[in-house]
Image (cartoon, helix red, strand yellow):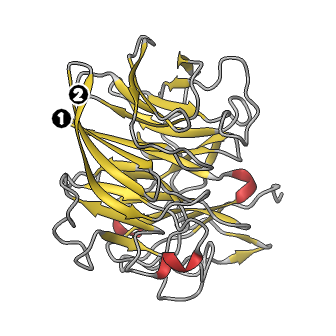
Amino acid sequence: MRSIFTIMIVATLAAGCAAAPAEVGGEVRPAGTATPTTTPGQPRTIAKGLRVPWSIAFLDGGDALVAERDRARLLRVTAAGRVTSLGAIKGVQPDGEGGLMGVAVKGERVFLYYTAASDNRIVRYRLTGGRLSDAKVIVKGIPKGAIHNGGRLAFGPDGFLYATTGETGDRRLAQDRGSLGGKILRVTEDGAPAPGNPFGTLVYSYGHRNVQGLAWDPAGRLYASEFGSSSHDEVNLIKAGGNYGWPEVEGVGSDPGFVNPIVTWRTSAASPSGMAYAKGSLWVGALQGKRLWQVPLGEDGEDGAAGTPVARFKGTYGRLRAVTPAPDGTLWVGTSNYDGRGDPRPGDDRILSVPLS
């Protein structure tokens, strides 16, 4: 029976483009046969009373750094639930979907992505003795807007920093390789283009509307979750130099010049944000869909085949945004019910620890 939304999954060819999906009764046949190998258990609340915990990154000692978007505070959260503030980050100007967003950690270095007065930027700090110091802007000039600011930061297995950006509602930026908007960036810790970048610039991939999540599987393949417009949200298998089609195509297209997604949802079911890999699946927080999507991945090498996604905790916790693997093998998931589009509940916003069995 056809559901109220359509899940579409297609295989991505080794060359980086996807085969056209087979239409069956108005829906799209799943190309992958992977099934979940683990099941999430009952979540436990780690912290509550937060305001839009946009991202989570773990320190070497096991504590987590949590960025509150609208308050512009960086929090330190222990596994036992103790929350301390490292302070409001200077220069952040929250506006609409902008504010303090991504956080990534490498040793004593903390990297933050935030909205400033004239742009979005990446700033590097040193964290010692519970104090941030030595602020240095390493990337600036990322377009900002009331919407579509990107904001995710993560270190890849290659040791370089990846950053996601949005096209701020100006669609033409996504196809302009000279703009930092609508891209995935790959940079060194000093903000220079990482060696091997396809165009010799910061740009790693382009043709994106608003990438919100990054995750790598054990083979080192990079996946990204992305907001669609009116029809389909996406998970993409990211290739260096790939053009992911926006605004020329949303979801699966037929132009071989664009890389097709490996998973799409109708926008009412997803608005996919933070994403993590754990135990054979991608785990994707859904904002409008108010659920945690589990996307099982096959072992088919470079084709990136994915099985049918499974909705977890549908409607239970409201809007879900941050999703990060914790050192103890659980997933930490942040709600986003205070972002202006949700319905806050007592205790919101909160960080949940989700066991995987």
For the question of whether residue 32 can be seen, the reply is: yes
Q: As shown in the figure, which amino acid type bears the numbered disc 2? A: Asp
| Residue displayed at 36% across by 59% down | 222
The image's mark for residue 349 is none
Q: Position of residue 344 (x, y in %)?
A: 73, 28
Say if mark 2 contacts mark 1, CB within 8 Å: yes
Out of 322 and 31, give the one closest to the viewer: 322
* Residue 312, quarter of picture: top right
Out of 234 and 357, give the one closest to the viewer: 234
Q: Position of residue 82 (x, y in %)?
A: 43, 11
Please give the residue where the numbered disc 2 appears in the rendered image. 60
Out of 298 and 245, give the one closest to the viewer: 245
Please give the residue where the numbered disc 1 appears in the rendered image. 107
* Element assignment for label 2: loop
Q: Give the quarter of the figure containing the N terminus.
A: bottom right
* Element assignment for label 1: loop
Tell me the distance, in whole angstroms, between the alpha carbons under discs 2 and 1. Answer: 7 Å
| As drawn, 17 above or below 305 | below
| Residue displayed at 20% across by 19% down | 129
Q: Earlier in the sequence, mark 2 or mark 1?
A: 2
Q: Position of residue 150 (x, y in %)?
A: 49, 56
Q: As shown in the figure, which amino acid type bears the numbered disc 1? A: Gly
